[in-house]
Image (tube, rainbow, N blue to C red):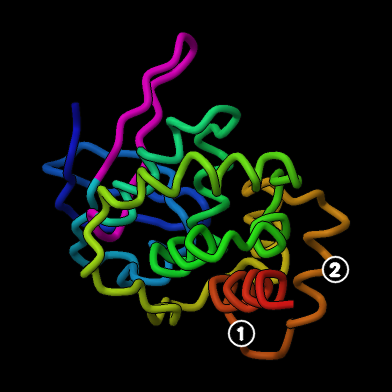
Amino acid sequence: MIGRLAGTLLRKQPPWLMIDVAGVGYELEAPMSTFYQLPASGEAVVLHTHLLVRDDAHILYGFHDEAERALFRLLLKVNGVGAKMALAILSGMNVDEFRLCIGQADSQTLTRLPGIGKKTAERLIVEMRDRLEKLDSGAAPVARTPADAPARAEDPVVDAVSALVALGYKAPEASRMVRKVAADGLDSETLIREALRAVTRK
């Protein structure tokens, strides 16, 4: 099991990134809460990881802190919740926000996340209430501000829409979400953050 990677961030395009560790490039998927904490490409980075082994692939997931990874692992134990949905949850809210949702039985906020209907939200509330006690209640909240990143040649709006689609939103919905918050000078990570914030705080 690969539990931690320390190396150089080679590239990042939500929800994927690559880290060079002693000449080996590790490809990972990560929630947006982790992307907001990443340094610029070419700088050193340390991520906590979870290796998911499937019949057709070995997929490595990266997280900024251990509380994120612990929540991801607990979410995978919930019936009907897979890795894609778990990433979408962590992209839409941080650990403390999710804990608050569960504690207040706030199914309405959960259903604003992609792929989560009323029944799934209710199942999350029931099954996660006891499991969340295993998480460190003193964990620091994940900051919701993106790290500075070098300018990219690609269109940040296109990148943001692609990332939201990868997280589970339908393409037309993702496009509408980004258009509502788009402004000159915003990078893709900021657009994604603001689009997700607008959805979960309606």
At mark 1, the secondary structure is loop
Q: CA distance from mark 1 to mark 2?
A: 16 Å
- Front residue (pair 157, 88): 88
Question: Residue furthest toward the left?
Answer: 22
| Residue displayed at 17% across by 53% down | 7
Q: Which residue is tagged 1?
A: 186
Q: Main secondary structure of the magenta part?
A: strand
Provide the residue span drawn in magenta. Answer: 49-66
Q: Is residue 149 magenta?
A: no
Q: Is 101 displayed left or right of 22 in the figure?
A: right
Q: Amino acid at mark 1?
A: Leu
Pick the quarter of the image with the C terminus: bottom right
Residue 116 against residue 99 in the figure, above or below: above
Q: Quadrant of residue 149?
A: bottom left
Residue 132 against residue 96 in the figure, above or below: above
Badge count: 2
Q: Quadrant of residue 4?
A: top left
**Residue 83 x, y percent position in the rendering:** 50, 36
Residue 8 against residue 128 in the figure, above or below: below
| Residue displayed at 60% across by 29% down | 80
| Residue displayed at 30% across by 71% down | 39
At mark 2, the secondary structure is helix
- Front residue (pair 170, 115): 115
Q: Is residue 50 magenta?
A: yes
**Residue 131 x, y percent position in the rendering:** 35, 43
Q: Which mark is residue 176?
A: 2
- Badge 1 crowding class, 10 Å Cα cut-off, few under 14, some 14 to 19, many 20 or more, is few
Q: Amino acid at mark 2?
A: Arg
**Residue 38 x, y percent position in the rendering:** 33, 67
